Amino acid sequence: MFYLTKIKKNLLKNRYGKYILIGGFTFFLVKGLIWLGIFTVVGLGIFNSF
């Protein structure tokens, strides 16, 4: 765990590190929202078919 915080501090020191952290967070947020939408559409389709 200490190693991860050390990496995070090093990335936050420079400008490109901040872009990598924010970009990674944004990518996984959008990916999660897309999967949530897929599961919602499929779930409602199965629910309405009964």
Image (cartoon, rainbow, N blue to C red):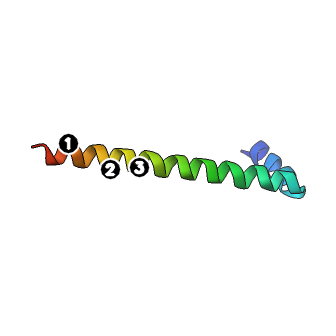
Q: Using the numbered discs, state the Cα–Cα distance from disc 2 to disc 3 in whole angstroms.
A: 6 Å
Report, in whole angstroms, how far the alpha carbon at label 1 lies from the one at label 2: 10 Å
18, above or below 3, in the image: below
Cβ–Cβ under 8 Å for marks 2 and 3 = yes
Q: Secondary structure at mark 2?
A: helix
For label 2, the crowd category at 10 Å Cα-Cα, with few meaning under 14, some 14 to 19 and many 20 or more, is few
Residue found at x 80% / y 56%:
18
| Residue 29 spot, x, y in % from top left | 56, 52
How many residues crowd mark 3 within 10 Å: few (<14), some (14–19), many (20+)? few
Q: Amino acid at mark 2?
A: Thr
Residue 30: x %, y % from top left: 55, 51
- Name the side, left or right, on which 3 lies relative to 40: right
Q: Toward the viewer: 8 or 14? A: 14
Residue visible at 41% across and 49% down in the picture: 36
The disc labelled 1 sits on which kind of residue? Ile
In the current view of this chain or complex, which residue is farthest to the right?
14
Amino acid tagged 3: Leu
Question: Residue tagged by mark 1?
Answer: 46
N-terminal label among 1 and 2: 2
- Mark 1 or mark 3: which comes first in sequence? 3
In what element is the residue under mark 1? helix
**Marks 1,3: beta carbons within 8 A:** no
Residue 40: image tag: 2
Q: Residue furthest left?
A: 50
Residue at the image point whose x is 70% and y is 51% from the top: 23
Q: Which mark is residue 21?
A: none
Please name the residue that numbered disc 3 is placed on.
36
Q: How far separated are the C-alphas under marks 1 and 3?
A: 15 Å
The image quarter in which residue 45 lies = top left
Taking the spot 24% from the left edge, 49% from the top edge, the residue there is 44
Drawn side of residue 43 relative to residue 21, left or right: left
